């Protein structure tokens, strides 16, 4: 299982962008398919909105082709 922490400077990051940034998906199309196939969870709950807002403090879990991922989103300290 891969554990990654992503720090963002904004109020939120769209789920598709987060998956690409973390490396859990190589492209936006791949990220969208993972989400639509029900392989992505936000704080333990499956969602199917590609542009779902992910805020600091939330955890995204992905059942990817290369194994499970856990992505923790934090606020970037200035």
Image (cartoon, grey):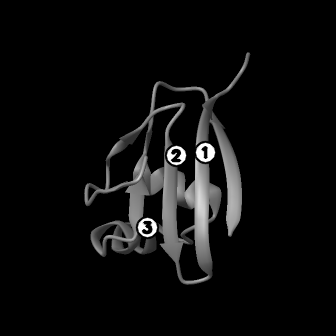
Q: Residue 32 placed where, x, y %? A: 36, 67
| Residue situated furthest top in the rendering | 78
Circle 3 is placed at which residue position?
A: 31
Question: Label 3 to label 2, Cα distance in Å?
Answer: 16 Å
Q: In the picture shown, does residue 57 fall above or below 64?
A: above
Q: Are marks 2 and 1 in contact (CB under 8 Å)?
A: yes
Mark drawn on residue 72 = 1
Identify which residue is drawn at 41% across, 53% down. Answer: 44
Q: Which residue is mark 2?
A: 59
Q: Secondary structure at mark 3?
A: helix
**Quadrant of the snapshot with the N terminus:** bottom right
Give the distance between the C-alpha atoms of the residues marked 1 and 3, in whole angstroms. Answer: 17 Å
Q: Earlier in the sequence, mark 1 or mark 3?
A: 3
Asked if the residue at tag 2 contacts the one at tag 3, i.e. Cβ–Cβ closer than 8 Å, the answer is no
Q: Position of residue 4 (x, y in %)?
A: 69, 53
Query: Which mark is first along the chain, 1 or 2?
Result: 2
Q: Nearer the viewer, mark 1 or mark 3?
A: 1
Q: Mark 2 Cα within 10 Å, few/some/many (few <14, many 20+)?
A: some
């Amino acid at each position: 299982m891969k554990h990654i922490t992503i720090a963002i400077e904004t109020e939120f990051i769209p789920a598709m962008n987060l998956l690409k940034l973390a490396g859990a998906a190589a492209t936006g199309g791949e990220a969208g398919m993972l989400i639509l196939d029900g392989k992505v969870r936000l704080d333990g709950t499956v969602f199917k909105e590609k542009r779902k807002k992910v805020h600091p403090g939330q955890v995204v879990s992905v059942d990817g082709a290369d194994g499970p991922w856990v992505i923790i989103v934090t606020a970037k300290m200035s």
